[in-house]
Image (spheres, rainbow, N blue to C red):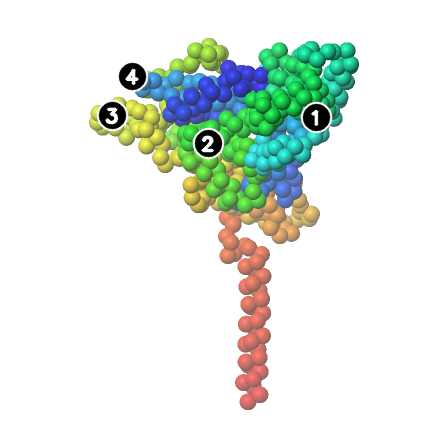
């Protein structure tokens, strides 16, 4: 089911009911871009601590926006053993443009190409995207709307409203008291905006929002005064409605937060960064504060990338990283397990595979979670009778992986949202000493090794570079291949031996000790 601005308010009550009754919610998000053009010290690297990775990625999240959110709400079916129904929805989003709010965001060409390849509906995103805002933006716009200190800022909105005022003014010249005219094609919070402008500009009209559009009625000034003070449609009431419409998807985000259901994704770190920035608050500078905020919003997070990466060996299924491949492998290797069906209005995915459509990927996330949890339950009870599966039992099986979110290209492989991050389990850092290669750069060193394996490279001294990979076999391969190389010497990096700071300190200590000994000997000789 695809939901844009036109359908959102009608579907909101149903969505709230579904989430409240759900066992968990699968999530996937599509963006206008993933990475800004980071280079030099700003480039994401395996050397980065999580706090460094966060600060670099934070800039990209602020630059790009969400174009589609996919949710798949999973609920166990009462009276049916281990059977779940999935309600999957695509939400097309577009930042709120109202009053002082006029967001800027970028497109990354490769991301646009990627989404085009999978049939992404850019018309729905750009023309019918659901508005949204974070708490900081909401506070500003709420203050301006409720105090009346607001005005139209967008040039497009100004032009449209000028045309509307001109049209209504020409009509008023010929109209008699009690006559009506309809302004079609104006909906959502923009309809309220038009009414605010018209009521402020023209003292002898009244406006009402109907299904067919904004209806303008010519009234006397006395009747206008009566309507303003007696009508249930008075400005103070529908100013609140403006805010509700302008908040758009943020209303549902708050419902999701309040429901406190487990949130499931695949490689979901970027999703969490965008959820925080776009719907909660601007991302803080503090990495620890970001973790605390996310944990308070979603106390139970499960990243299926992290789970499947950890257990593929012990559960004996092929190692694959692509979400669709993980789903296919689990589906073909699981003879028994949870039965998952699609809700009636969401049966598209029962017949069609739609990779990288957000709701489809959200459905895959939830399905992978249930299948993996069932395998873990089978393993625990392999020597005895297995209890009747339930989602609470599945959640117990997944307890070691709760709030552990996969981290791509950083010094640690995952972030722990419910406590301190775990120490790195990456391969050891290697040190490359260069001889007879004057002026060697990090890029040249990278190209030297790229045909053998991929390393991140960081300069240590004029003739030394640190090398880091995420594969142990690559580290072993390079140590073996370059053991007797005439100009490139590769060995394991040892901090106490190779760190320039330690070397400098030892040199200073050596000099001080030498001079102290020399002074002592001179003192002895003078006696």
Q: Do the residues labelled 2 and 3 touch (CB within 8 Å)?
A: no
Q: In which quarter of the image is residue 72?
A: top left
Instruction: Pick whichever of labels 2 and 3 is earlier in the sequence.
Output: 2
- Give the foreground label among 2 and 3: 2
- Residue underneath mark 2: 257
Q: Measure the alpha-carbon separation of dots 2 and 4.
A: 28 Å
Looking at the image, which residue is at 66% across and 44% down? 441
Which residue does the numbered mark 1 point to in the structure image? 200
Upstream in the sequence, badge 1 or badge 4? 4
Q: What element carries label 4?
A: loop
Along the polypeptide, which appears first: circle 1 or circle 3?
A: 1
Mark 4 against mark 3, which lies toward the viewer? 4
| SS at circle 2 | helix
- On residue 387, the disc is 3
Sequence order check, earlier mark of 1 and 2: 1
Comparing 497 with 298, the one in front is 298
SS under mark 3: loop
Q: Alpha-carbon neighbours of circle 1 within 10 Å: few (<14), some, or many (≥20)?
A: few
Judging by the rendered image, the residue that carries numbered circle 4 is 79
511 over 221 or under it: above or below: below
Label 1–label 2 contact, CB within 8 A: no
- Asked if disc 1 and disc 4 are in contact, CB closer than 8 Å, the reply is no
Q: Residue 66 falls in which quadrant of the image?
A: top right
Q: How crowded is mark 4: few (under 14 residues within 10 Å), some or many (20 or more)?
A: few
Q: For the image shown, how many numbered marks are present on the structure?
A: 4
């Amino acid at each position: 089911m695809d939901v844009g601005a036109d359908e959102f308010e009608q579907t909101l009550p149903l969505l709230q009911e579904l989430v409240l009754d759900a066992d968990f919610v699968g999530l996937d998000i599509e963006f206008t871009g993933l990475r800004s053009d980071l280079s030099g010290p700003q480039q994401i690297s395996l050397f980065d601590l999580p706090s460094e990775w966060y600060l670099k990625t934070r800039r990209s999240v602020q630059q790009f926006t969400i174009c589609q959110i996919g949710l798949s709400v999973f609920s166990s079916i009462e009276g049916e053993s281990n059977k779940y129904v999935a309600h999957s929805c695509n939400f097309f989003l577009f930042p709120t443009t109202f009053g002082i709010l006029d967001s800027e965001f970028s497109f990354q060409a490769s991301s646009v190409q990627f989404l085009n390849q999978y049939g992404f509906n850019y018309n729905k995103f750009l023309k019918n995207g659901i508005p949204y805002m974070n708490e900081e933006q909401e506070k500003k716009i709420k203050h301006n709307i409720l105090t009346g200190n607001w005005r139209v800022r967008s040039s497009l909105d100004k032009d449209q409203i000028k045309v509307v005022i001109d049209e209504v003014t020409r009509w008023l010249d010929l109209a008699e008291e009690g006559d009506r005219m309809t302004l079609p094609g104006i909906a959502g919070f923009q309809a309220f905006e038009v009414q605010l402008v018209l009521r402020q500009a023209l003292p002898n009209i009244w406006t009402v929002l109907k299904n067919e559009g904004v209806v303008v009625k010519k009234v006397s000034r006395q009747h206008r005064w009566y309507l303003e003070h007696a009508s249930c449609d008075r400005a103070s009431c529908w100013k609140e409605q403006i805010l509700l419409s302008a908040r758009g998807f943020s209303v549902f985000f708050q419902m999701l937060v309040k429901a406190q259901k487990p949130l499931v994704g695949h490689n979901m770190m970027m999703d969490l960064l965008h959820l925080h920035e776009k719907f909660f608050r601007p991302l803080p500078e503090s990495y620890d504060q970001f973790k605390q905020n996310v944990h308070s919003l979603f106390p139970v997070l499960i990243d299926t990338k992290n789970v499947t990466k950890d257990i593929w060996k012990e559960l004996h299924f092929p190692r694959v990283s692509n979400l669709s491949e993980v789903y296919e492998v689990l589906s073909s290797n699981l003879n028994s397990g949870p039965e998952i069906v699609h809700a009636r209005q969401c049966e598209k995915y029962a017949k069609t595979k739609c990779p990288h459509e957000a709701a489809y990927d959200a459905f895959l996330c939830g399905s992978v979670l249930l299948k993996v949890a069932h395998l873990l339950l089978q393993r625990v009870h392999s020597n005895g009778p297995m209890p009747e599966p339930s989602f609470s039992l599945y959640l117990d099986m997944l307890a070691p992986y709760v709030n552990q979110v996969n981290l791509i290209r950083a010094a640690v492989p995952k972030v722990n949202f419910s406590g301190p991050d775990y120490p790195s389990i990456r391969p050891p850092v290697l040190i490359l000493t260069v001889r007879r290669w004057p002026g060697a750069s990090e890029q040249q060193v990278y190209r030297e090794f790229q045909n053998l394996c991929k390393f991140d490279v960081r300069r240590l001294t004029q003739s030394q570079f640190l090398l880091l990979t995420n594969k142990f076999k690559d580290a072993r391969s390079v140590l073996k291949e370059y053991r007797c190389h005439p100009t490139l010497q590769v060995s394991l990096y040892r901090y106490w031996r190779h760190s320039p700071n330690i070397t400098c300190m030892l040199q200073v200590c050596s000099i001080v000790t030498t001079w102290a000994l020399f002074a002592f000997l001179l003192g002895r000789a003078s006696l």
